[in-house]
Image (spheres, helix red, strand yellow):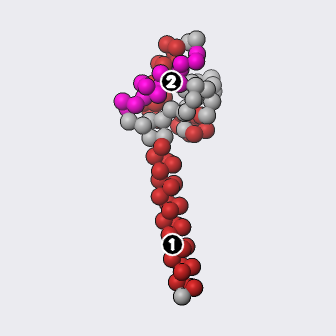
Amino acid sequence: MARSSTALLLVLSFVLMIAFADVAQGYNKLRPQDCKPRCTYRCSATSHKKPCMFFCQKCCAKCLCVPAGVYGNKQSCSCYNNWKTQEGKPKCP
């Protein structure tokens, strides 16, 4: 009885781990129509709104992800974080 309970608990834990991994991964996946509102918030604190919005929307269209907040947090969206200019600087705000 103890052995079957342990096996059941192990299987249940594994299933929950997979389910939560899918939820966490899907959190950053936006629909294209979600880009403008997310970028509007992302660029709300800058004095350079026009270029910020241009590049944020370009990055969002490619990555379907915009990091949370108005600055930083790029690690939550690897595509957004890793896209660089020819000079090696970050392309996405």
Where is the C terminus found, in terms of image quarters? Answer: top right
Position of 60 with respect to 82 (left or right) is left
Residue placed furthest toward the bottom: 1
- Asked if the magenta segment contains residue 33, the reply would be yes
Look at mark 2 in the image and give the residue it sits on. 41
Residue 49 lies, in percent from the top left, at 52, 14
Q: Residue at x 53, y 19 (%)?
A: 44
Look at mark 1 in the image and give the residue it sits on. 11
Q: Are marks 2 and 1 in contact (CB under 8 Å)?
A: no
Q: Amino acid at mark 2?
A: Tyr
Where is the N terminus found, in terms of image quarters? Answer: bottom right
Magenta segment: 32-46
Q: Residue at x 51, y 54 (%)?
A: 21
55 to 75, vertically: above or below: above
- Most foreground residue, 5 or 74: 5
Q: Tag 1, which secondary structure? A: helix
Q: Amino acid at mark 1?
A: Val
Q: Tag 2, which secondary structure? A: helix
The mark total stands at 2
Camera sees residue 91: no
72 to 11, vertically: above or below: above
Q: Residue at x 54, y 74 (%)?
A: 9
